[in-house]
Amino acid sequence: MELLFAIAIGALTTSGVYLLLRARTFPVVMGLTLLSYGVNLFLFASGRLATGQQPVIGTTASYSDPLPQALVLTAIVIGFAMTAFLVVLSLRNLADNENDHVDGRREATTAASKVEQEVSSK
């Protein structure tokens, strides 16, 4: 169970960082979302992965800590609100700039389209 959790956390973090390094808006938003899911799983795993155990009542060796579960629930709500805000912000950026690059630069046009633009301007 711990190995599966570790692999899931690693995969979410790796794909989140990869998507954060993209130059488009939507992959950056998805990367932040996947990275927050990885952090949520890490926080959840820090409270012990025990199935069928009572949350607090019992011996200290066989209980799961409820604090990371509460932190994860709070992080899910805040993460959902921030994702909605980033989507709206990126849509506004796309509408204003007609471009979805994160750094605001326009794409370099290809050589064929440059030639086509020069011919059409003459």
Image (cartoon, grey):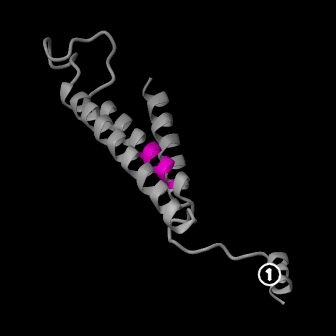
For disc 1, the marked residue is 117
**Relative height, residue 22 to residue 66 (above, below):** below
Q: Is residue 48 left or right of residue 32?
A: left
Q: In screen coordinates, is 120 left or right of 67?
A: right
In the rendered image, the vertical position of residue 120 relative to residue 91, given as above or below: below
Q: How many marks?
A: 1
Determine the residue positioned at 52% across, 57% down. Answer: 25
User: Helix, strand, or loop for circle 1?
Assistant: helix
Question: Which residue ends up furthest to the bottom in the rendered image?
Answer: 122
Kindly report the secondary structure that dominates the magenta region of the rendered protein: helix
User: Is residue 29 part of the magenta span, yes or no?
Assistant: yes
> Is residue 2 shown in magenta?
no
Say few, some or many: other residues with alpha carbon within 10 Å of mark 1 (under 14 / 14 to 19 / 20 or more). few
Amino acid at circle 1: Gln
**Magenta region:** 28-35
The answer to whether residue 91 is left or right of residue 52 is right
Residue at horizontal 23 percent and vertical 21 percent from the top: 64
Where residue 113 sits: x, y (%)? 81, 76
Image coordinates for residue 16, horizontal then vertical, percent = 49, 49
Task: Locate the C terminus by quadrant.
Answer: bottom right
Query: Foreground: 10 or 100?
Result: 100
Q: Position of residue 97 (x, y in %)?
A: 52, 68
Residue 30 at what x, y percent from top left? 50, 47
Quadrant of res 74: top left
Q: Nearer the viewer, residue 37 or 26?
A: 26
Quadrant position of the N terminus in the picture: top left
Quadrant hosting residue 73: top left
